[in-house]
Amino acid sequence: MTEKPPRIQDVAKAAGVSTATVSRALSNPELLTKPTREAVFEAVRSTGYRVNRAARNLRKQSANAILVLVPNLGNPFFSKILEGISEGFADSDYSVLITDSNHLPQHDRRLTDYFLDGRIDGMISLDGNLTDTDMSEFARERVGGRIVFACEWVEGAPMPSVRSDNYKGAQLAIRHLHDLGHRRIAHVTGPADNRLTHVRREGVLAERRRLNLPQRPEWIIRGDFSLQSGRAAAQQIVAMKDRPSAVFCASDEVAFGLIAGLNAAGLRVPEDMSVVGFDDIDQAEHYVPALTTIRQDRIGLGRAAAELLLGQMAHPAGAEAVGVELLDVTLMVRDSSAPPAKPG
């Protein structure tokens, strides 16, 4: 004969309290005195009682889960942000679910369904390419107040975001190369439709103007944050009659691909050309040569996004709160940048 699992009534009897007190101890323990809490928790342990979370979530109309949208789970850049998000929710009752937004099944394409089906309570999007349809559905279903953007964002979206100071980072990179003596500085961008691409390129152009550096259209090279686009950029640079002496790449992966392409063409880094990246992913300091780059506090970014979303959900407002939290960036000087072989 199968033994019945312990019920909340069994816990109450073992602890000498009411079932309401047991329920309160499990959901809001801070409302009870320490002796009562300890008596209930000891009874839970001795009886082997386990909370039926599915039933509790149904009663509370809460899933106790957060969805994190990542545009490319294969990109090592996102790992530290996810670590920070997990840290941010570690002391909460929320589980963190992660999905690759580039490979969502067709039936999951309507992101509002995650909310409406009771699968999640909130969302952090690291994807800045959500569509106008997504934005309209968030507004129509009134779930925007439970969504936060991190790292990337949708311009004009009525949701708060946490992001690095990408503009300043680009300025720091150009200024560093200028201080080394470089005047002929190229820039390999990210994808054309990406907000990070635009902000970093604006920082590059503003700093080049401020320092009165030459502005050559061919020295702004289209990339897409990938190793392959870095190698393609190297081929373009090698073919130039008027080559730059230094290159600032919009991501570390682009910089790795660029350096590999330059090496294949017989150009040495930094002896023949200096290279600076952006992100400071884990491989940057172990690459050969160790990559000079702009460090984003990715763990801090993820943690700040989690804290922002927890605040949003704890104090739901009729109108969505819109704001931008900028995190500082740091120039990490390593071996891939050096003074030019020839001045200028």
Image (cartoon, rainbow, N blue to C red):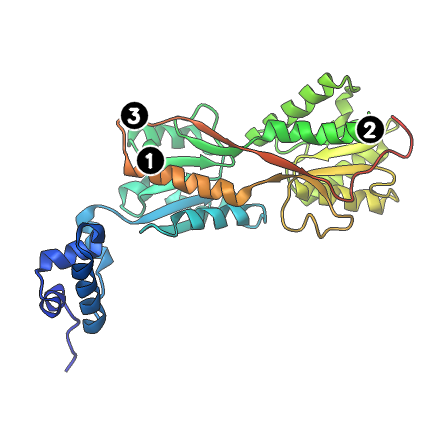
Badge 3 or badge 2: first in the primary sequence: 2
Which residue position holds label 3? Answer: 319
- In the image, what residue type sits under mark 1? Gln
Give how far apart the Cα atoms at labels 2 and 1 are.
Answer: 46 Å
Q: Which mark is residue 312?
A: 1
For residue 146, which quarter of the picture? Answer: top left
Give how far apart the Cα atoms at labels 3 and 2 are.
Answer: 50 Å
Residue at the extreme right of the image, as rendered: 342
Badge 3 or badge 1: first in the primary sequence: 1
Q: Is residue 341 left or right of residue 338?
A: right
- In the image, what residue type sits under mark 3? Ala
Q: Is residue 165 left or right of residue 219?
A: left
Give how far apart the Cα atoms at labels 3 and 1 are.
Answer: 11 Å
Q: Residue at x 15, y 74 (%)?
A: 4
Q: Residue at x 82, y 38 (%)?
A: 338
Q: Position of residue 293 (x, y in %)?
A: 69, 39
Badge 2 or badge 1: first in the primary sequence: 2
Secondary structure beneath disc 2?
Answer: loop
**Where, quadrant-wise, is the N terminus in this rendering?**
bottom left
Q: Which mark is residue 182?
A: 2
Q: Residue at x 37, y 36 (%)?
A: 147
- In the image, what residue type sits under mark 2? His
Of 143 and 84, the residue lying toward us:
84
Secondary structure beneath disc 1?
Answer: helix
The reply to whether residue 101 is in sight is no
Vertical relation: 9 (above or below) 163: below
Q: Position of residue 287 (x, y in %)?
A: 73, 51
Secondary structure beneath disc 3?
Answer: loop
Q: Position of residue 123 (x, y in %)?
A: 38, 41
Of 301 and 245, the residue lying toward us:
301
- Give the crowd class for mark 2: few <14, some 14-19, many >=20 residues within 10 Å: many
